[in-house]
Amino acid sequence: MISCIITTRNEAKTLPDLLVSLNKQTYTDFEVVLVDNNSSDQTKEIAKKFGARVFNKGPERSVQRNFGAAKTKGEYILILDADMVLESEVLSQLAGLSKNNDISAAVIPEKSFGEGYWARCKAYEREFYLGEDSIEAARFFDKKIFNRFKGYDTSLTGPEDYELPLRMRKAGIKIGRIKGFILHNEKKFSPLKSAKKKFYYASNARAYLKKHPEMTFSQGNLLFRPVFFRKWKKLVSQPILAVGMFLMRIIEATGALLGFMAGFFRQG
């Protein structure tokens, strides 16, 4: 069994699409465990209508995910966000991959979609990261391995997505990859709203980079990531989107820098 863990807070608008995509999976031996953080909308009610097991826990994603993992019944866990949609073969491919005894975790590649120019820029940016180990994060885990590593670092908010798979890689855990995609709903993407999120997440970045300083250039450098230079042909092939992407990255990087500085002074 695969246990799908979804963490939520006021996700009534996006959650149904994810739950519908789970119901359309060609692989049916799975459960849905939703861990909500005190939503004030209909998130919990919607999840229950789709047959999910619903719990309430906060204050942040890493705590919610570890809590959800402790409540699961399956041998494998898949970590999902409410604004995602899965292609129909994702669970089937993960189940097939899990039969390989050498693989204890897996990356599901992601694409973005949404409304308007900025959402197109975000989708364009995500295309650069396909196959990049420093950017893509594993979301599928053998539960025994997940527990051995004590799950996500609950002191982190934002970087925890990368930190757990990175710890696993350093310990020699083999991380696989499937072909099916997770589709990430950017909705009507706003660079300013994204910058606010980057501010919040970057306030925890010091602790992450202290544990993994080698990731500073590849992940910490939001504007001039090496992958943009390696895939320069893709940049010049879509100049209108490229200009928008870099403008968007400048706005996000500004928010992240301010957040990092705020976190640095707060932590001393």
Image: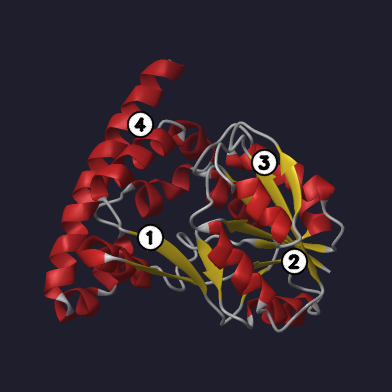
Q: In the rendered structure, find residue 260 and report the number of the disc placed on it.
A: 4
The CA distance from mark 2 to mark 3 is 22 Å
Where is the N terminus found, in terms of image quarters? Answer: bottom right
Dot 1, crowdedness within 10 Å: few (<14), some or many (≥20)?
A: many
3 or 1: tag closer to the N-terminus: 3
Q: In the rendered structure, find residue 64 and report the number of the disc placed on it.
A: 3
Q: Element under label 4? A: helix
**Mark 1 lies on residue:** 186
**Mark 2 lies on residue:** 104
Indicate left or right for 32 with 122 as reference: right
Disc 3 vs disc 1: which is toward the camera?
1
Where is the C terminus found, in terms of image quarters? Answer: top left
Amino acid residing under circle 1: Glu
4 or 1: tag closer to the N-terminus: 1
Amino acid residing under circle 2: Ser
Disc 4 vs disc 3: which is toward the camera?
3
Dot 3, crowdedness within 10 Å: few (<14), some or many (≥20)?
A: many
The CA distance from mark 4 to mark 1 is 24 Å
The reply to whether discs 1 and 2 touch (Cβ–Cβ < 8 Å) is no
* Camera-nearest residue between 166 and 243: 243
The answer to which quarter of the image holds residue 227 is bottom left
The CA distance from mark 2 to mark 4 is 33 Å
The reply to whether discs 2 and 3 touch (Cβ–Cβ < 8 Å) is no
